[in-house]
Amino acid sequence: MRRLRQLAERTPAGRERYVDLLRALAIIVVVLGHWGVTVIGYDRAGRPTGHSALGDLPWAWPLTWVAQVMPVFFLVGGYANAASLTARRSRGGDTTGWLVDRSARLVRPTTALLVVLAIGAAVARLRGAEPSEIRTVVWFATIPLWFLVAYLIVVPLTPPMYALHRRFGLVVPLVLVGLVALGDLGRLLGPAGLATGNYLFGWLAVHQLGFAWYDARSPDTPRHRRLPTSRRTGLALLAGGLVALVLLTIVGPYPVAMLNVPGERLDNAAPPSLALLAVATAQLGLILLLQAPARRWLRRTGPWQAVIAVNSVVLTVFLWQLTAAVLLIGLLDAVGVLPTPRVGSAAWWAWRVPWLLALAVVLAALVAVFGRIEARSRRTSPARSDTRAPGPTGSGTDGTGPARAPTPAGDAGPRTPSVRAVLAVAGYAGVVAGLLLNSLTRKADPEPLGLPAPALVAYLAGAGVLRLLRSGWGNRG
């Protein structure tokens, strides 16, 4: 508490605290949503299994318009990436140094999860568990990595995409929306694979709006680069997004649910569809409408300390949420008290509250152990101006600790910038390839380590390269 109070007191007046609040709320909603719709049962072999309740609760599909908050995460990511990149450059740092330091906050907590899961899988295999059973458990625990793959692709694209934003402004997300529309047309008329590009175009479109929101804070920014943030704009975006959403789903061919529903031909989130972008538009409108009261509320010490606390371990919470579910299910099954009520029954609804509370306890224990890795990454990373207001130097504190001068690990020396850039991109590519291969591997495939061996090797190799670059390797002649 003392450290949180110190961080809150050192927060500069110009920091956009609302962005931090949105990031924390988005992850909390994701976690509660995943836990809340989980249905536990037993398969024919008597083993615990799980699936989403959405297929049995069609009346709840419109609620996913609120529960699907990954657009908020990418919007906030765009704001934070633009702010930190701008601050890094204002201090004389380079793009490669920014990219390398950015990796610490994403890769370190993810590495901890994957290594622990692999070790746990190896122990289970030595105790006689079948590889297919091990894979099923690990597959479930790594579901959150689907979204992290997309974000890890977007982060290295921030420098060129921000350059496009500085030149063309809001035209860029409009073009990306058009590409999403073409992808949707392809999968509506043909195979779903024609929309694969939407994984990139859809999230990039939302990420670009984060750039425009960041630039809106400076009155000197050209109008074509600034997101209008007035109350009138918020109302227009909210109303327009909802109208488009109703036309696309209720009237049009898109599913009403913004989360995966078994049996539906289209999945609005994988890859992002026009309907999901309509949700993003409405959510952006609501964000703009609530910004004034939220900012006033965040000036209070208590709420701001809570936001700092959540954000210090926010990725850890996101990554370990379903591992907590796996552990709780295993524990309840081992002692013979795992409830399996029918979806929608009174018993199922009554079980939601103790289920969520028990999961929160397990997750809190995991965060207490592994959250230190993320918190340490945030304290040691030089690129810590994520949501600071634009300024001449970007110096000062950002609510998570004092900013420090760039270190050799952060800024490449003049002798080998191209080599470091190639290595940084290669490191990110290895990490993304490993996570993507894991996500594409079927949940019942026999994998003794739970994760496909090539995926684990690719990920660890990429993470290792990024770790060496952060330590200063490749920065010396």
Image (cartoon, grey):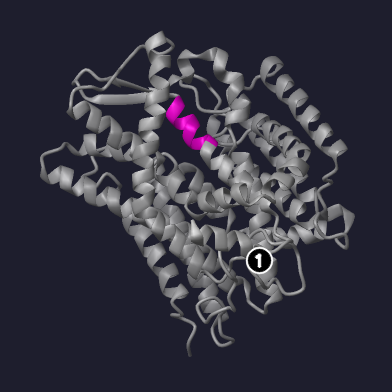
Residue 224 higher or lower than 12, as above or below: above
Disc 1: CA contacts within 10 A as few (<14), some (14-19) or many (>=20) = many
Instruction: Report x, y in % for residue 151.
Output: 55, 50
Instruction: Report x, y in % for residue 391.
Output: 76, 69
Residue 191 higher or lower than 71, as above or below: above
The residue at 24%/43% (across/down) is: 447
The residue at 44%/45% (across/down) is: 317
Q: Is residue 185 left or right of residue 130?
A: right
Does the magenta-highlighted stretch encompass residue 194? no
Residue at the outermost top position = 345
Query: Foreground: 204 or 418?
Result: 204
Q: Is residue 179 left or right of residue 458?
A: right
Instruction: Report x, y in % for residue 24.
Output: 56, 45
Query: Foreground: 40 or 271?
Result: 40
Main secondary structure found in the magenta portion: helix
Q: Which amino acid type is marked by label 1?
A: Leu
Viewer can see residue 443:
no
Tell me which segment is drawn in magenta: 29-36
Residue 360 higher or lower than 343, as above or below: below
Q: Examine the image and state in which quarter residue 85 appears.
A: bottom right
Residue 218 higher or lower than 359, as above or below: below
Q: Is residue 295 left or right of residue 93?
A: right
Can you identify the residue that label 1 sits on?
85
The residue at 60%/71% (across/down) is: 403
Residue at the outermost bottom position = 477
Query: Foreground: 75 or 296?
Result: 296
